[in-house]
Amino acid sequence: MLLFTIAIVAFLIWKVSQGRNWARITVLVFFVIGLLPSYFIVRSELGRSTSLGVFSILQAALQAYSLMLVFTTPAKQWFRGIPAKLSNFDPSIG
């Protein structure tokens, strides 16, 4: 089951990196679906080991931040095929 899950996640990450909007939405849906069960898992982990619970919270926070970045304006433009503007970019400066 773990290998199957890793394969699905790797596939979705690959498709997101190719600019597939459906993959970006799918990752968001999976994250939201996983939030409720993760609350109970983190509660039990904090009861057993504070460090384990803190690492789980950090992992969820990093996933949420990553998803936020994928849905911000520069990423939205990239998914639409609009080239992002490079502010203050001067190629003559080495």
Image (tube, helix red, strand yellow):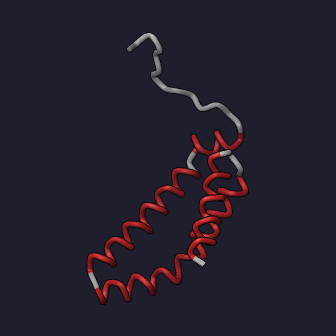
Which quadrant: the N terminus?
bottom right
Q: Residue furthest left?
A: 50
The correct choice, above or below, for 83 with respect to 12 in the image is above
The correct choice, above or below, for 77 with respect to 10 in the image is above
The correct choice, above or below, for 83 with respect to 53 in the image is above
Q: Position of residue 34 (x, y in %)?
A: 56, 76
Which quadrant would residue 76 be assigned to in this image? top right
Which quadrant: the C terminus?
top left
The residue drawn where x is 45% and y is 82% is 39
Q: Residue furthest top?
A: 92
The residue drawn where x is 60% and y is 59% is 10
Horizontal side of residue 61 vs 20, given as left or right:
left
Which quadrant would residue 42 be assigned to in this image? bottom left
Total labels: the figure holds 0
Q: Position of residue 49 (x, y in %)?
A: 28, 83
Depth order, front residue of 71/8:
8
Depth order, front residue of 18/67:
18
Q: Position of residue 88 (x, y in %)?
A: 45, 22
Horizontal side of residue 83 vs 67, given as left or right:
right
Depth order, front residue of 32/45:
45
Depth order, front residue of 58/12:
12
Q: Position of residue 21 (x, y in %)?
A: 71, 52
The residue drawn where x is 62% and y is 47% is 17
The correct choice, above or below, for 89 with respect to 20 in the image is above
The residue drawn where x is 65% and y is 56% is 24
